[in-house]
């Protein structure tokens, strides 16, 4: 409370947010010992204090963006995310907003930005990615008391992303179509849903063949090893066939499960063409070539689980999705979901019981 009574005396007791310093407490005994007098004294104290507080000079967007990258981004984001923010700021946001003060960026300026990028034929998803960085930067300015509020942002409508996955028989054909030295990594991707960066960084330390599990602790992005996406470890149980597969793959070339002959980490480029050749040999290369990446195996893992009756919540945890919305794209593949929902209507005592009860009580349905 701004004013309080203690031992029959009225005090002003309030807090101020000081830019660059944090919260500062104001506590004084009121010269007028009534509640009304203390409240008036509190307003006078706050006005006097605010008039002497240091104020940040309003800064241009390009100046603040540099500080945002050096302070907020590098301490709160993975290296790959920092690089992505840097690229979006340098190539898009700074050229457009750079000369404006951050307080001059309002809804009208943001709508102009969206229209300009749409005219450059950027996808709605890419534009939304830019707006996400812009919003985070402005929110950080608000938290530092350099901006009063974040302007409203209306996101671009993005169509639901299409994804391609292999049927059960197609997955078997893909494994058989792969060169022998690549079959293990392809089959493991199909059986665990690991991302390509997680496969590249996987160590024997992360694999427990006795307990039958993999703990995903690391991932590589742009040549740098860090934490998995969303910064969260996750555990993936292994089927009996997968355990047998990994036991047969054991080697003494180093700590990495998949590596070069010298024990060094493979690159994404080294994994690209072996998978494409396996698709082609399996007769699956008729799909648009840009779709045939390692993400197809991850989609296939999730799709197979749902088609075999796994819950969406379990699939979410195995994939490491931060929200269930990401996993819902697979919901339509479950033949039991809609059927089970409709069959709820045939359970005795749900609708019929409610109807009879309503009639007894003189109500209507």
Image (tube, grey):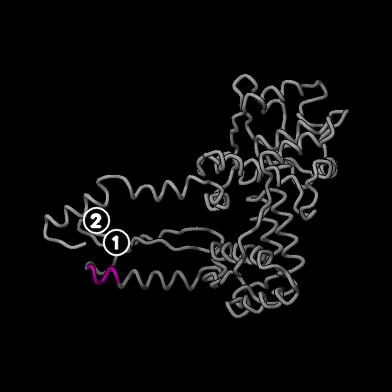
Q: Residue drawn at (54%, 51%), measured in percent from left and top?
A: 332
Residue that numbered label 1 is attached to = 11
Picture quadrant where residue 303 is located? top right
Say whether residue 162 is magenta: no
Judge from the rendering whether residue 21 lies leftward or rightward of residue 182; answer left or right: left
Number of numbered markers: 2
Asked if the residue under mark 2 is in contact with the one under mark 1, i.e. CB atoms within 8 Å, the reply is yes
Q: Quadrant of the N terminus?
A: bottom left
Q: Residue furthest front?
A: 346
Q: Secondary structure of the magenta portion, mostly?
A: helix
> What label does residue 198 carry, if any?
none
Q: Residue drawn at (42%, 46%), measured in percent from left and top?
A: 340
Residue that numbered label 2 is attached to = 6
Say whether residue 38 is magenta: yes
In the image, is residue 238 above or below residue 174?
A: above
Q: Quadrant of the C terminus?
A: bottom left
In the image, is residue 330 above or below residue 34?
A: above
Q: Residue drawn at (76%, 43%), measured in percent from left and top?
A: 224
Q: Secondary structure at mark 1?
A: strand
Residue 291 visible in this rendered orientation of the protein: yes
Q: Dot 1, crowdedness within 10 Å: few (<14), some or many (≥20)? A: many
- Write down the region rendered in magenta: 35-39
Judge from the rendering whether residue 290 lies leftward or rightward of residue 29; answer left or right: right
Q: Secondary structure at mark 2?
A: strand
């Amino acid at each position: 409370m701004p004013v309080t009574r203690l031992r029959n005396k009225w005090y002003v007791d309030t807090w101020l947010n000081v830019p660059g310093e944090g919260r500062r407490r104001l506590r004084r005994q009121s010269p007028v010992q009534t509640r009304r007098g203390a409240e008036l004294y509190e307003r006078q104290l706050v006005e006097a204090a605010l008039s002497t507080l240091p104020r940040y000079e309003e800064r241009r967007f390009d100046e603040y963006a540099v500080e945002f990258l050096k302070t907020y981004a590098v301490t709160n984001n993975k290296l790959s995310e920092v690089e992505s923010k840097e690229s979006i700021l340098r190539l898009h946001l700074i050229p457009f907003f750079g000369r404006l003060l951050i307080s001059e960026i309002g809804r009208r300026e943001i709508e102009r930005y969206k229209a300009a990028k749409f005219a450059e034929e950027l996808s709605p998803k890419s534009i939304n990615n830019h707006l996400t960085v812009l919003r985070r930067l402005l929110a950080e300015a608000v938290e530092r008391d350099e901006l009063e509020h974040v302007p409203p942002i209306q996101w671009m409508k993005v169509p639901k992303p299409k994804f391609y996955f292999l049927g059960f028989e197609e997955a078997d054909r893909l494994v058989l179509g792969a060169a022998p030295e690549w079959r293990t990594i392809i089959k493991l991707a199909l059986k665990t849903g690991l991302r390509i960066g997680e496969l590249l960084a996987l160590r024997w330390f992360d694999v427990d063949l006795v307990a039958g599990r993999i703990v995903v602790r690391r991932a590589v992005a742009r040549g740098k090893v860090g934490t998995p996406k969303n910064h969260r470890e996750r555990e993936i149980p292994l089927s009996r066939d997968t355990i047998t597969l990994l036991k047969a793959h054991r080697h003494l070339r180093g700590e990495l499960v998949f590596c070069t002959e010298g024990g060094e980490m493979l690159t994404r480029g080294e994994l690209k063409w072996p998978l494409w050749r396996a698709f082609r040999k399996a007769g699956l290369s008729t799909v648009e070539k840009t779709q045939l990446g390692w993400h197809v195996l991850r989609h296939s893992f999730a799709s197979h689980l749902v088609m075999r009756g796994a819950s969406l919540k379990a699939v979410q945890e195995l994939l490491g999705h931060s929200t269930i919305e990401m996993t819902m794209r697979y919901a339509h593949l479950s033949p039991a979901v809609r059927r089970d929902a409709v069959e709820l209507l045939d359970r005795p005592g749900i609708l019929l019981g409610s109807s009879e009860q309503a009639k007894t009580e003189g109500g209507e349905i």
